[in-house]
Structures are given as structure tokens and as C-alpha cells.
Amino acid sequence: QVQLVQSGAEVKKPGASVNLSCKTSEDTFTKNCIHWLRQAPGQGLEWMAIIDPSGRPTNFAQKFQGRATVTREASTRTVFMELSSLTSQDTAIYYCARAPSHSTSSGRWYFDFWGPGTLVTVSS
Amino acid sequence: QSALTQPASVSGSPGQSITISCTGTSSDLGTFNLVSWYQQHPGKAPKLIIYEVRKRPSGVSDRFSASKSGNTASLTISGLQTEDEADYYCCSYAGSNTLVFGGGTRLSVL
């Protein structure tokens, strides 16, 4: 059974960083790419990044390059996403989502399972 | 990258069919057959309903179909049901290992 368990809600001050987690199953951690996306209140979905289990470099949407970091921790089968220099514009629900494959070019670029999301509120 | 363009809202009556368009450019949707569609009910995570332009995941109703022509992809929902009322998002591979979403379309089933 696919599980993506995300960390709890966060409240941060402007300028701070937030570190979000997405705990996966053994199978997912070793075989699937994980994406990070976000959705601001009342707004649409925005793709942020992809991390690959095969060791390929992590890729980011241009607007997050230099401000977001995505890492994997094998011992806990967890993927982390850190976003720094937060502003009120970063207030959103952050989702991790699984791509069905890492080994095919097509299978890396859509999401067959989503985590429940983590609400991040940035407010002074 | 610029977002893909979707109508903000569409509506239909139960039993009718509706189509949601998703327009991109030759740099994204027009070049790559990596278009996916997601359904999102309020307060819920999105759900995959179409991948690779026209493929349906197991368990998704065959009332959902999709296609692509040039720089525009389309999602058609036939035999509208009240539970289809939701937000729908298209997504396309945009090259350079990136993805781009449409702004979303709110479907009302009247």
C-alpha cells in the first residue's frame, strides 16, 4: 500500500526557513521519484521540484532555485524539502507526490499518489 | 515558464458532457506527450485522472477522456454526475526537467 505521510502544520515568521518531510514506504523510496508541489489559499497548483531515487540531480522550478533544497534520508525512508527566506507569498499547502517510475522518461512526470499536504503559514 | 491556460470555470447539467481546454506553447504541451489531468475536491489532495495525454489510471471512470491537438489539450467528461463537481488541473512537461500547471478550472454541475 502506497503511503506518503507528511509532517504537521507550520507557522513561520518572514525570513525564516521551513523544513517539511514526506515519509514513504520502502518500495516508493527506492523505486519512485518524489515531487514537491504547493497550493496557495484559493489558488492553483504549482510544481516546485523533483528528486530521483537513482541519484540524478534534483530539479527545481526556476522560481525556487537557490531557495529550496530537497534531500532524502534512507534510514527513515523520508524525503525533506527546505524552503528558505520565507515571505507571506509562501503561505500554502505543500504536497509531496509520487511519480509512478524513475526509470522511464514518461513515468517521472505525473503523480499517481499524493500526500495529504502540510499547511505552512508565514506571518509576522 | 508561464502557466498553461485553462478556463476559470465551466458548467453543465447532470448527464451532459463538458470539455475543458488547456493551452500551452510549442515549448511545453505542443512538444511533449506528457500531459496529465487532476481532479481536486475542496479540502482534498488532487487525484490523477489522465496521464500521458489520454491514458486513464485503473479505477478512473471511462466518462473521463482526453486528447491533444497542437498546443491545446482537452479533457472531456461525459454523463456529468454531481460528484464530478470539482477543480480540474492540467499539467505538462515543459522541458529541462520541469513541469508546468494550468491555472485550474472549476466545474459546476447545475
Image (cartoon, rainbow, N blue to C red):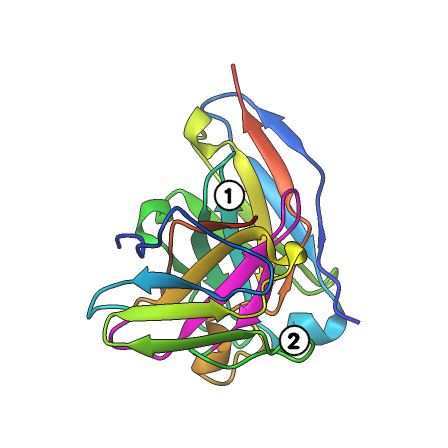
> Is residue A23 located in the magenta-colored stretch of the structure?
no
Q: Nearer the viewer, residue B69 or A73?
A: B69
Q: Quadrant of residue A99?
A: bottom right
Which of the numbered marks, if any, corresponds to residue A39?
Answer: 1
Which of the numbered marks, if any, corresponds to residue B83?
Answer: none
Number of residues whose C-alpha sits closer than 10 Å to that of mark 1, classed few (under 14), some (14–19) or many (20 or more) = some
The reply, left or right, for residue B100 in relation to residue A111 is: left
Position of residue B103 measured from the top left corner of the image (x, y, whole percent): 39, 49
| Of callouts 1 and 2, the N-terminal one | 2
Residue B11's place in the image compared with B77, above or below, is above
Q: Is residue A87 visible?
A: no
Residue sitting at the far left:
B26
User: Measuring 50% from the left and 35% from the top, which residue is drawn there?
Assistant: A42
Q: Quadrant of residue B25?
A: bottom left
Identified by mark 2, the residue type is Thr
Which of the numbered marks, if any, corresponds to residue A30?
Answer: 2
- SS type, badge 2: helix
Q: Which residues are magenta?
A: B29-51
Residue B64's place in the image compared with B47, above or below, is below
